[in-house]
Amino acid sequence: MTGTGPHNPLSSRLRALRPAAFGADPSGERWERIKRSPNFSDGVFQNPVGARTRPSGGSMIEFAKIYFRKEARARRSPVGHVPLHATTLADLAKPPASGLRLTWMGHSSVLAEIDGRRVLFDPVWGERCSPFPFAGPKRLHPVPVPLAELGPVDVVVISHDHYDHLDLPSIRALASTDTIFAVPLGVGAHLEHWGVPADRLRELDWNESAQVAGLRLTATPARHFCGRGIRNQQHTLWASWAVAGPEHRVYHSGDTGYFPGFKDIGAEHGPFDATMIQIGAYSEYWPDIHMTPAEGMRAHLDLQGGGRSGEPSGAMLPIHWGTFNLAPHPWAEPGEGTVAAAAAEGARVALPRPGEPFEPTAERVPSELWWRAAATAPAQGWAASGDKGSSPEVAPTA
């Protein structure tokens, strides 16, 4: 077969030399399906609106100066032990009273228990989000529970193929179970390369759905990019996900910049009892592919119908922060920014420690500013209780 990237003889020889963690390029019928996608043109997957994916030219030099500045580097990591929830497995052994429970395991990894089924989003249990065990961003806190002790999972959902969302050791461990994998179009090539049988893959383009164990999983648009190898060929799709059970619905943003499509996703697949929204690893040098806490709150409100009185008011769980150092902002800033944004909007936000299960529709959700115990305080000190930088009142369930 002729064409771009993965299908010429030289590329085939080079692929044989690359590390297993780089995964595999789409080929065969998968590649044909990608080329038929309405989201694929000019040889690459396209964003719903334009997006810059990395600094370039002079901005890259400016970014490097900031990133490696000694005083800034010190603030990008916790100075003490990140407090973990101590009784995760014991808590998970009891069924959720409401039928819906979320457990944030750190970064974007979340176990969602929905109407008697278990969904594991973006499981990353590895020590580094990197293709190499000796280099790359290292975990800033231990995983709350070993993956092998987590118990059966009905479906694993992957948002895209970046290393901090698609982790080779975690996928290989889960491949030995009976779980189904729901992934964006093209990502299945990586999983098959790592030992996941094709019949356990549900590989979806945007706005396609699959039924798994009584749940409807829909790949929804996101504003990001993809790639695991040396060259970023944009041949695998990135997605956010809407998951609906008989009684409850949740949304996981994956990685995304802000874009108007959140309103459409909410109108089509909501109302959501909970949203899991990326609020970390943002920077002015890549403003289109990751959201700031304020943008994340705006996305949450868009998904919920705008946050107007009388509209759905599900809880927002901030994700994609606290576990890996991936951007120049201070380690605690995403948490502080989310609290401030929630207070300003009167929104319901959950602030669990890693490993702390909570029920989004319960009267109260976790609200302790736990990260302050492990962070370097800002020069002006922490925001005082009661202002827009403090923990918002947790609103009753609507």
Image: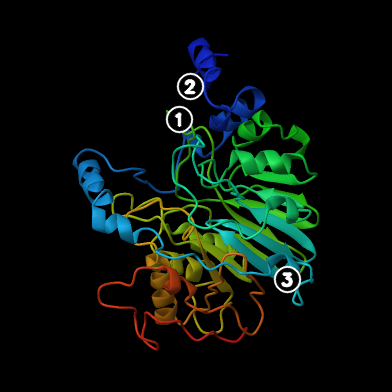
The x and y percentages for residue 322 are 47, 61
- Mark 2 packing: few (<14 Cα in 10 Å), some, or many (20+)? some
Look at the image and tell me whether residue 271 can be seen. no
Which tag is nearer the camera, tag 3 or tag 2?
3
Label 2: state its secondary structure: helix
Q: In this view, does 145 lie to the left or right of 142?
A: right
Instruction: Report which quarter residue 271 is drawn in.
Output: bottom right
Is 49 in front, or is 283?
283
Q: Is residue 78 left or right of residue 167?
A: left
Instruction: Report which quarter residue 161 is drawn in.
Output: top right
In the rendered structure, which disc, 1 or 3, sits on the residue that comes first in sequence? 3
Instruction: Report which quarter residue 86 is drawn in.
Output: bottom right
Is 41 in front, or is 13?
13
Q: In this view, does 22 lie above or below 215?
A: above
Disc 3 marks a residue whose amino acid type is Asp
In the rendered structure, which disc, 2 or 1, sits on the residue that comes first in sequence? 2
The x and y percentages for residue 99 are 76, 72
State the mark number for residue 233.
1
Residue that appears at 68% across and 67% down: 88
Disc 2 marks a residue whose amino acid type is Gly
Q: Which quadrant holds the C terminus?
A: bottom right
State the mark number for residue 5.
2
Residue that appears at 66% across and 32% down: 194
Is 115 in front, or is 337?
337
